[in-house]
Amino acid sequence: MAGKTLYEKIWDQHVVRDNGDGTALLYIDRQLVHEVTSPQAFEGLRIAGRKLWRVDANLATPDHNVPTTDRSKGIEDPISRLQVETLDQNCTDFGVTEFKMDDIRQGIVHVIGPEQGATLPGMTVVCGDSHTSTHGAFGALAHGIGTSEVEHVMATQCLVQAKSKTMLVSVNGKVNAGITAKDIVLAIIGEIGTAGGTGYAIEFGGDAIRALSMEGRMTVCNMAIEAGARAGMVAVDQKTIDFVKGRPYSPKEDQWEQAVKAWNELHSDADASFDTIVNIDAANIKPQVTWGTSPEMVVGINSKVPDPANEKDAVKREGMIAALKYMGLTANTPMNEIEVDKVFIGSCTNSRIEDIRAAAEVAKGRKVASNIKLAMVVPGSGLIKQQAEKEGLDKILIEAGFEWREPGCSMCLAMNADRLEPQERCASTSNRNFEGRQGQGGRTHLVSPAMAAAAAVTGHFIDVQDM
Amino acid sequence: MEKFISLKAIVAPMDRPNVDTDAIIPKQFLKSIKRTGFGPNLFDEWRYLDHGEPGMDNAKRQLNEDFVLNQPRYHGAQILLARENFGCGSSREHAPWALLDYGFRVVIAPSFADIFYSNSFKNGILLIKLETGVIDNLFNDVAATEGYELIIDLETQIITKPDGSTVKFDVDEFRKHRLLNGLDDIGLTLQHTDDIKAYEQRRRTEAPWLF
Ligand code: SF4
């Protein structure tokens, strides 16, 4: 019998029932809940007089709408406030554990799941948010779902799912000094395109992925969705197990051995076959900067803004011309001559302790350049903020001229008060550079935390390796 | 989802083709955190003379007296008689939510937009497609008789008019089964409760740390 991929192993372990029509009823071990996509799900339960199937499988926190400045004043915008208050009320009514806005454990759902050990290897994890793929870094099967599916999981602990195709993206060899997980994943998206993973669950493998910390693997899996794949995953190894150990929701002493034994099976078998395999040479990856309005519009920092005239495909060419117009860029401009107005370090892609350390390392002893209107650092959770403060990173950043904020999604999607003004240019560590994503008319360039900090202190994009 | 077995109710006529979902419930109401409460804003732009926004006190707004649902003779209507391509436009599930919240359980039309069609059945609204000629007759009957009522029986798939004459209608077997039993997607999955429980029991031994 042929071996199984990691995806197939987890899938098989979670089939409750084969529906016989290409779909299966799949059991869900963990649902993470936030304020934007849950209110109608809770209300649906209420209307139908239903309860949660398994209350303890759910964990909630508000993140999209929370202010990142002084929280004692509450939320100013009435719609944002209502969403957060509704989450609080729903969690109270249905008995769901919630880390509220003033709880030190509050943060971006995709940050707090792993931080609490609520995301474990081999689990199926869902959340009403597309970046749920993040949790795949633990050898879990994790993906985003819509509001009606959120309600379905709440009521039944299951989802009706069709099996995905499997893709292995193997990043071979060693990356150069200064190359981060963000650069790796942007390079992958640049290679396979934003639709390259559509219909697939991607497993990221190869030496360069194995060499990443758990934080780095989360960054890579987080952006699997930007490559079109609903789920991204990395096989379990000792790093995974070490990370998980001792967290509040991790298996307790008496179950630990049994769990580790099961987790050690969570990798694709040597003779497993994937529907598609993509090989990438790690040594060729440069620090990445996006130049357009889609994550696949990305180049190395040492390159120039691409010229649509060199694009043969007419549709792509039009897309490039439109993107350059929106971004206010001229073809063939060296990337390191592009000046920025704002810098955002945060989001579920890059707001973990390692990211903040990387930013602080660049910022240390330097000052935010005079042309920068705002450089902000938004930790992914209250606990990360606390840890960073313990390490003195906040002082380094504040000293350099960065603003040090409260945890949340913040300027990743500008649902709260943090946003770009029209035509403002931002070096951002988030995951989407779509038109208007960070504020109407705002221009987003996706980069790693170190590259964002380097842009903040020089006022323009620059190869962090040259600093 | 509420079962639908049979219904005797007043019919309101919506005599225009291509009624889209933005007309059924305008986009400014989508910011709501609820799936109920859309009823007062059903057909908002036609129903009121001013521009509606969420949070307004609808009781204080000026009604468009000419709009059909504002005419006293159609108060309490639960059956909507419509023209072709009803429910076209954006896929918002708020459209059936608004119809349902207002009180409609049945819409009769010559044709419906696809997504609206499946969204409506999922939410417990019965959509009935009839020949244009039959629809024309119904529009005439409704206009001629104040308090015009129809009896709609899903089990037998028969519509009975006030004079006792009947019209047969088609409905997909699976959708009929779901409506008769009040089964939404969740209800269907809950038919497999035993399988889910058996799975959980097995997993509690295999992977107890997950529970
Ligand atoms: S940080 Fe951004 S991408 Fe992540 S969950 Fe929040 S809004 Fe979504």
Image (tube, rainbow, N blue to C red):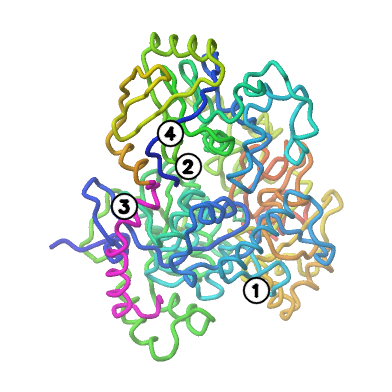
Q: Name the residue under label 4.
A: B7
Is residue B201 magenta-colored?
A: yes
As drawn, which residue projects farthest toward the front?
B163
Residue at image mark 2: A194
Q: Is residue A225 left or right of residue A34?
A: left
Q: In which quarter of the image is the C terminus of chain B?
A: bottom left
Please state the horizontal and vertical placement of residue A384, each as a whole percent of the image.
66, 73
Q: What element carries label 4?
A: strand
Q: Mark 2 lies on which chain?
A: A
Q: N-terminal of the two: label 2 or label 1?
A: 1
Label 2 to label 3: alpha-carbon separation: 16 Å
Q: Distance between the residues labelled 2 and 1?
A: 33 Å
Contact flag, marks 3 and 1 (Cβ < 8 Å): no
Q: In which quarter of the image is ligand 1?
A: bottom right
Magenta range is B182-211
* Percent of width and height locating residue B143: 54, 12
